[in-house]
Image (cartoon, rainbow, N blue to C red):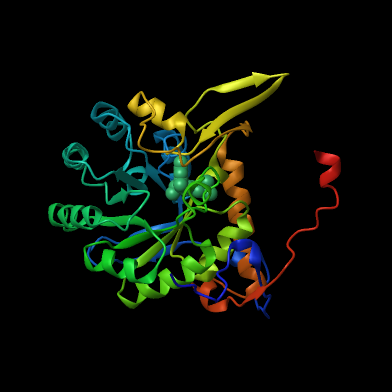
């Protein structure tokens, strides 16, 4: 047994120090980025935020809404081939450019993803997604996918430490997805005792990835736009959001009406709700590592996105970053023991 003594930080442990700036208005801030990748020769331009590949969030409706903002959606892996065919038939190249196709590590999924990519050349991104990216099986699956799709942009995860980021990049990932346990409906840390505070994971993993010309996605743990800014400030190239995009019209799930208020269910992909839905049973050898929550229905996702982007632009003006790309260089974190003023919380309970 060994203990690492230095404290690892989450978003709530820091704030960003303001810096002298020549920017006059938030409208001068450019959130668009253009990326080139380690293996794929495809370039991608957009705002590097990604809707999570959870079945409630990564829907075709979400793709349509977010592509208007040049934002990516990682589409969940439960759509049938016919549903993909319909979606691709009615979608423009611009929409398809902002799609990430998700896949687990089974051979059936490998077969299905080959069929999906035959439907359109405009699809560029694959995300190989497992809860625990530390297994040898996962690494060898990643190598197979890279072999089959030499020119696609491949994301793989999740991991939280530099040495595993390096291994995944060397094994064929253009982008590594980082996060174990920070998610809003995740109970992994409680069930297993395993995890890593997200901001420290970002700092360690982005350093490892950038050293090899790779990129990272910070996945999970953002609950306000300030957290997204901290993730970019810490070195994340992309930020993936689940909970912040939940409860909107573009999500899948029924709207429940109770005492004339509307709600939607949001659940983790390893929750009992998801296991029952997709396997028809709760497997006895595994415990649920996700929870189900009922959240107020928030209508169309557009206003939430505008709010997030407004917050990010404001961060950039506070630190003098004209472009999102400059945010990491302009970021100094200060460690804090306080965040917002909660004086009015008692009235709003
Ligand atoms: P959020 O933005 O809601 O904080 O985090 C979203 C991320 O949580 C997802 O992209 C995924 O990585 C993770 N996640 C989703 N469902 C589950 C689950 O059931 N268990 C765990 N451990 N993580 C989950």
The answer to whether residue 23 is visible is no
Residue lying at 15% horizontally and 54% vertically, measured from the top left: 144
Tell me the quarter of the picture where residue 77 sits: top left
Residue lying at 44% horizontally and 34% vertically, measured from the top left: 61
Tell me the quarter of the picture where residue 29 sits: bottom right
Looking at the image, residue 151 sits to the left or right of residue 333; the answer is left
Residue lying at 33% horizontally and 48% vertically, measured from the top left: 129
Query: Looking at the rendering, in which quadrant would you find the C terminus?
Result: top right
The answer to whether residue 201 is visible is yes
Residue lying at 46% horizontally and 36% vertically, measured from the top left: 271
Looking at the image, is 118 positioned above or below residue 318? Answer: above
Looking at the image, is 283 positioned above or below residue 98? Answer: above
Where does residue 138 sit, x and y in percent of width and height?
25, 53
Residue sticking out furthest to the left: 147
Query: Looking at the rendering, in which quadrant would you find the N terminus?
Result: bottom left
Looking at the image, residue 148 sits to the left or right of residue 161; the answer is left
Where does residue 267 sit, x and y in percent of width and height?
50, 35
Looking at the image, is 168 positioned above or below residue 322? Answer: above
Where does residue 163 sit, x and y in percent of width and height?
33, 71
Query: Who is closer to the viewer here, 1 or 245?
Result: 1
Looking at the image, is 305 positioned above or below residue 296? Answer: below
Tell me the quarter of the picture where residue 154 sits: bottom left
Where does residue 27 sit, x and y in percent of width and height?
62, 62
Residue sticking out furthest to the front: 1
Please give the count of numbered marks on the rendered protein: 0
Query: Who is closer to the viewer here, 178 or 280?
Result: 280
């Amino acid at each position: 047994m060994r203990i690492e003594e230095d404290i690892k930080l989450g978003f709530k442990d820091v704030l960003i120090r303001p810096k002298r700036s020549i920017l006059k208005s938030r409208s001068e801030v450019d959130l668009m980025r253009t990326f080139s990748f380690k293996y794929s020769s495809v370039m991608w331009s957009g705002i590097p935020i990604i809707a999570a590949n959870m079945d409630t969030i990564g829907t075709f409706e979400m793709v349509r809404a977010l592509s208007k903002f040049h934002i990516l959606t990682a589409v969940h892996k439960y759509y049938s081939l016919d549903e993909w065919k319909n979606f691709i038939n009615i979608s423009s190249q611009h929409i398809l450019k902002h799609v990430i196709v998700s896949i687990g590590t089974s051979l059936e999924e490998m077969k299905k993803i080959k069929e999906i990519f035959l439907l359109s050349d405009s699809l560029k991104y694959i995300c190989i997604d497992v809860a625990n990216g530390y297994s040898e099986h996962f690494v060898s699956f990643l190598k197979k996918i890279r072999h089959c799709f030499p020119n696609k942009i491949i994301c793989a995860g999740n991991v939280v430490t530099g040495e595993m980021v390096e291994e995944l990049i060397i094994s064929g990932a253009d982008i590594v997805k980082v996060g174990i346990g920070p998610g809003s409906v995740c109970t992994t840390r409680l069930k297993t005792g395993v995890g890593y505070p997200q901001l420290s994971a970002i700092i360690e993993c982005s350093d490892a990835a950038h050293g090899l010309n790779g990129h990272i996605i910070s996945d999970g743990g953002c609950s306000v736009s300030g957290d997204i800014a901290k993730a970019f400030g810490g070195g994340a190239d992309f930020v993936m959001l689940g909970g912040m995009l939940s409860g909107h019209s573009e999500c899948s799930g029924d709207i429940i009406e109770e005492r004339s208020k509307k709600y939607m269910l949001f659940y983790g992909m390893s929750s009992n709700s998801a296991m029952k839905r997709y396997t028809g049973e709760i497997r006895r050898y595994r415990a649920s590592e996700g929870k189900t929550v009922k959240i107020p229905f928030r209508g169309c996702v557009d206003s939430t996105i505008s709010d997030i982007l407004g917050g990010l632009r404001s961060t950039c003006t506070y630190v003098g970053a004209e472009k999102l790309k400059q945010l990491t260089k302009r970021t100094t974190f200060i460690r804090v023991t306080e965040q917002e003023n909660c004086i009015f919380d008692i009235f709003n309970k």
